[in-house]
Amino acid sequence: MHTAEKVIITTAITGSVNIPSQSPYLPLSADEVADAAVEAVEAGSAIVHLHAREPDGRPTADPEVFEKIVGRIAGQTDAVVNITTGGASSMTMDERLAAARRLKPELASMNMGTMNFVYSGIADKVAEWRHEWEEPYVRNTYSHPFVNTFDRIEDTLRTLGEAGTRFEYECYDIGHLYSLAYFADLGLAKPPLLIQGVFGVLGGIGADHANLEHMVRIADKLFGDDYCFSAFAAGRDQMAFGTHSAWLGGHVRVGLEDSLWIGKGTLARSNAEQVRKIRAVVEDLGKPIASPADARALLGLRGGTA
């Protein structure tokens, strides 16, 4: 692993997993997502990872909604904008890719394999539903896989890569590292690789700190110094895994996509609140925070959209 001299904070603003009935603070409309992203950057986030939603919170792949969000962020910050290609597991691959194809961002996420991605358990914790779409949406994940086939991964690496987009490789298990190594051997995944270790999603690797260290060991074996590592855990383990990643020499990700909480029993009131918390932890470890310019230099990003 390329050891971080400055730690990149990525903020995943809204995602497609958590739903409005869980928290009144989850950004939903394009303006809310953009405002939340700007606040996160002002708090110290170098990268903002973007999904989009309808005003009622339903995930959307509409490129026009993404354009509105990205335009607002670009007009007010110099942040690195990372557009999802994961979307939601209920979307087709073409829907999931639509915004990245339109906007050709400098950074996009890339999920490294088909998997069970289960968050139906949310339904058991909601006492009162705000919208009719929410319960069937989350329960559906118990019986439908999250599809990321090799042909579509290859096609996306080729087509977006030709436009100058680089990738955040989201690895939910050790096997995903080997899948990434396959595409690196083909010359389609080009160093420096940004590997995002994802822990605590049902169907993927568990939020056990031994798993985090194991993932780094295998990545070291496969990629040597040709990669940067970042990690997050879904839910209550978010801050602990960010701290561990920074301590190992990696980067961190926070945001309401991954956890709605700021502490035990306390909902986070904003993405920026989580950024400020992890920033304080990282700085207490004696590590400076990377600016967007630092992140671009470290990850070989071109800046802006194509």
Image: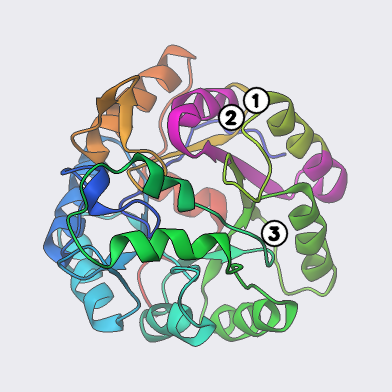
User: Which numbered dot is residue 245?
Assistant: 2
Q: Report x, y in % for residue 181.
A: 81, 60
Please indicate whether residue 44 sits to the left or right of residue 77 in the image.
right
Residue 298 part of the magenta-drawn span: no
* Quadrant of the drawing holding the N terminus: top right
User: Which numbered dot is residue 191?
Assistant: 3
Q: Report how far apart the C-alphas of labels 1 and 3 lie in the structure.
A: 20 Å
First along the sequence among labels 3 and 2: 3
Q: Quadrant of residue 114?
A: bottom right
Q: Residues within 10 Å of mark 1 (few under 14, many from 20)?
A: some
Q: Which residue lies at the image location 48% right of the left edge and 15% below the top edge?
A: 286
Q: Report how far apart the C-alphas of labels 2 and 1 lie in the structure.
A: 5 Å
Q: Which residue lies at the image location 69% right of the left edge and 48% below the top edge?
A: 227
Q: Is residue 301 visible?
A: no
| Magenta residues, start to end | 218-246
Which amino acid is tagged 2? Ser
Q: Is residue 259 above or below residue 82?
A: above
Q: Which residue lies at the image location 21% right of the left edge and 54% below the top edge?
A: 77
Please indicate whether residue 23 sits to the left or right of residue 212 in the image.
left
Q: Is residue 44 above or below residue 222?
A: above
Which amino acid is tagged 3? Pro
Q: Which residue is mark 1?
A: 248
Which amino acid is tagged 1? Leu
Q: Report x, y in % for residue 130.
A: 17, 55
Q: Report how far apart the C-alphas of labels 3 and 2 lie in the structure.
A: 20 Å
Please indicate whether residue 108 sits to the left or right of residue 226 in the image.
left
Residue closer to the observer: 89 or 165: 89
Q: Is residue 59 above or below residue 104?
A: above
Q: Report x, y in % for residue 27.
A: 20, 53
